[in-house]
Amino acid sequence: MFKHIRFFFRRYVVLIMLSIIVLFVLNLYLGYAIAVNPVTGDLKKSPGAIIEKVSEGLLESEDGRLELSEEGKNLLTESGAWAILIDNSSSDVIWNDHVPPEVPSHFTPTDIAGFSRYYLKDYPAFTWENPNGLLVLGFPKDSYMRLGDKYYSIPVLQKTITQALPLMLVFSLLAVMVIYIISGTLMMRPVKNVVAGLDALSRNCPVSLKEKGAFSEVFASINQTSAILSQKNEALKKKDNARANWIAGVSHDIRTPLSIILGYAEGLKASNDNETQQAGETISHQALRIRSLVNDLNLASKLEYEMQPLCLEPIDVMESLRQVISDTLNNGLPEQYTIDFDYHDNCGGCLVKGDAKLFERVLVNLIQNSIRHNPDGCDIVVRLEKRAEELELTVSDNGIGATQEKLKQIRSATHYIQNEEESAIQNHGLGLFIVKKVVSVMNGKIAFESECNKYFSVKIILPMFHSTEVNDVNLTRENRTY
């Protein structure tokens, strides 16, 4: 663990140091590029060009005096400069134009050497060799900056810096982004492999990561975990198959003795003795109940382990409801029970996609659930409504209901095998478990609501099925069994 933390820490330190070095070198290069290339602005109006023109225009008149040409005067006026001419032998100023009062009229060789490289009384000074002496041009104090033998126009330099700073910032950000993208890609690659491995484990998929690099120990742990889970899943699968096969075998084997019991029960029911008839009725009723439970157990097992063959087809919900309710009434519904079918007119012809036999089994189970758990009778209401692109089916009764604890267990139950914690679910038999599984297969949603001694309600919401070939949809009930 600490090994991986140190690895990441070193990576981040190296990343930060690399970013600092790159930014420093980049900005140093840009600064150097400005420093070695004097910023003069317009070359035709540069100090070198001006002093050369002024020197060419400084000539002796007929009376021996030095006079500056009009072009030279205009250049000095436009640039705000002043000029002096220093005699080579005496170092005295023998000519000047617009010279400031603080500029002396005599210079020593040391003074000349000083301002020829730097400033003259804080004025940027430039020199030029003239036939009559040393020509010196001085510019306003805030016009030029001299560094050695190079000079920079301060206004142009300010403009250049103003434009260069955003450029330097952009280049710096791009450099940092490139560094982070490259480094982040290299650092996140093993992390992505870890995430991909964990995601595969969550989906019970086998994982095989290359055990190399700084995350080799993590990769090895994930591979080991994957192998262990695969072994356990295989063992669980074998157990589940064995249990499902055992249940299917028992369900098959129990039918023969049940048939014999039912045959003898029918014989007892035909007896002239009332007690014998009553015993036959009881035996027949309990045998039928056992057969129903065995069938439910077998179906629940197949649904749970996805062994039940499904025949998905469009189902007319209205027709299925009518047929189930009609069969329930025709089979002899006790007098203490009533069934009311409430539906909206727009539900006619509405289709859902599912297995028709299993869907009818859902309807039967919901109605029988209300009958089975209310021995003193109740009123059962079956309601069908169309809401947008969904059908809402509700089966409710006003019987004894269920406690909130039982209701919570019914909602959260994912297994039908009885245990101490799920005994309340078994009080509602396998019927609701089968209902939940079938609704899930049909991509529907189910909700349970109840209040003790008041009502019990099951609401199923199913997505509607739209078919462009309704005439080819087989909605007949032939060859359908429960």
Image (cartoon, rainbow, N blue to C red):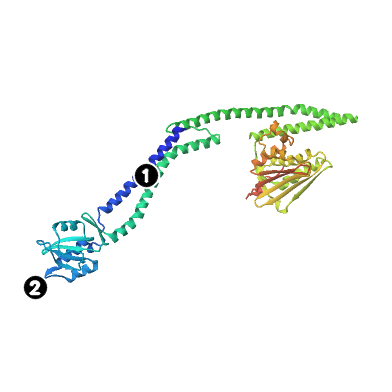
Quadrant housing residue 307: top right
Earlier-in-chain disc, 1 versus 2? 1
Q: How many marks?
A: 2
Image coordinates of residue 358 in percent, x first then y, are: 69, 39
Image coordinates of residue 25 in percent, x first then y, are: 31, 46
Q: Is residue 388 left or right of residue 285?
A: left
Above or below residue 382? Residue 249 is above
The residue under label 2 is: 63
- Taking the spot 26% from the left edge, 53% from the top edge, the residue there is 35
Quadrant housing residue 255: top right
Above or below residue 473? Residue 482 is above
Helix, strand or loop status at disc 2 = loop
Q: Is residue 261 left or right of residue 350?
A: right
Cα–Cα span, label 1 and label 2: 71 Å
Mark 2: amino acid: Asp
Q: Could you classify mark 1 by the number of other residues whose Cα lies within 10 Å: few (under 14), some (14-19), or many (20 or more)? A: many
The residue under label 1 is: 19
Residue 235 in view: yes
Q: Could you classify mark 2 by the number of other residues whose Cα lies within 10 Å: few (under 14), some (14-19), or many (20 or more)? A: few
- Taking the spot 71% from the left edge, 29% from the top edge, the residue there is 251
Image coordinates of residue 70 in percent, x first then y, are: 18, 71
Above or below residue 37? Residue 313 is above
- Between 126 and 75, the residue placed more toward the observer is 126
Q: Is residue 405 left or right of residue 78?
A: right
Mark 1: amino acid: Ser
Tell me whether circle 1 and circle 2 mark residues in contact (CB < 8 Å). Answer: no
Please name which of the two marks, 1 or 2, marks the residue nearer to the observer: 2
> On residue 416, which mark appears?
none
